[in-house]
Image: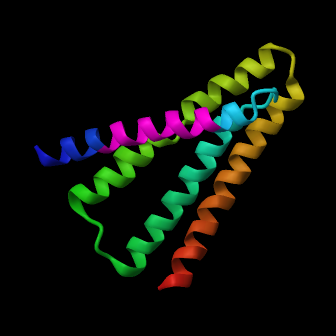
Amino acid sequence: MIRPLAVAAGGCVGALLRWAVAGAVHRLTAEAAFPWGTFAVNAAGCLAIGFLAELTELRGGLGGPTRLFLFVGLLGGFTTFSTFGYETLALFREGSTGLAAANAAGQFGTGLLAVWVGIVLARSIV
């Protein structure tokens, strides 16, 4: 029973963090047509999962309920790929094809880069 509770607790924390971080970024960039809040959350989530996964790989120690809490719950609740898809499609529907393409390419590119940077950071401290 502890494993589902770890995922649920992490998901709750991650969703609350996503709401807070995306909201803060959105308020800072309210005049922009680009969805910076979602962009920032996905980049941060990719960075975090890259860092934690590599740190776990190199040092061990994160297993069972802790790993489920962090990776499945917290980071799963924090990143917003479904929102990314919706916002990208909305930009296309509004006729903002360039912004939609920039969002899609930027999300994927930044996500991959952030995972790699997280791996490099984890390796640099081990």
SS assignment for the magenta stretch, majority: helix
Relative horizontal placement of residue 75, taking residue 37 as reference (left or right): left
Relative horizontal placement of residue 72, taking residue 82 as reference (left or right): left
Q: Does the magenta stretch include residue 100?
A: no
Relative horizontal placement of residue 101, taking residue 6 as reference (left or right): right
> In the rendered view, would you say 125 is above or below 112?
below
Q: Nearer the viewer, residue 11 or 63?
A: 11
Residue farthest left in this picture: 1
Task: Give how far across and how far down residue 10 sits, in percent.
Answer: 32, 45
Identify the residue at horizontal 36%, vertical 54% (top origin): 70
Identify the residue at horizontal 30%, vertical 58% (top origin): 67
Q: Does the magenta stretch include residue 22?
A: yes
Relative horizontal placement of residue 64, taking residue 120 as reference (left or right): left
Q: Which of 5 and 95 is in front in this view?
A: 5
Give the quarter of the image for residue 60. Answer: bottom left
Residue farthest top in this picture: 94
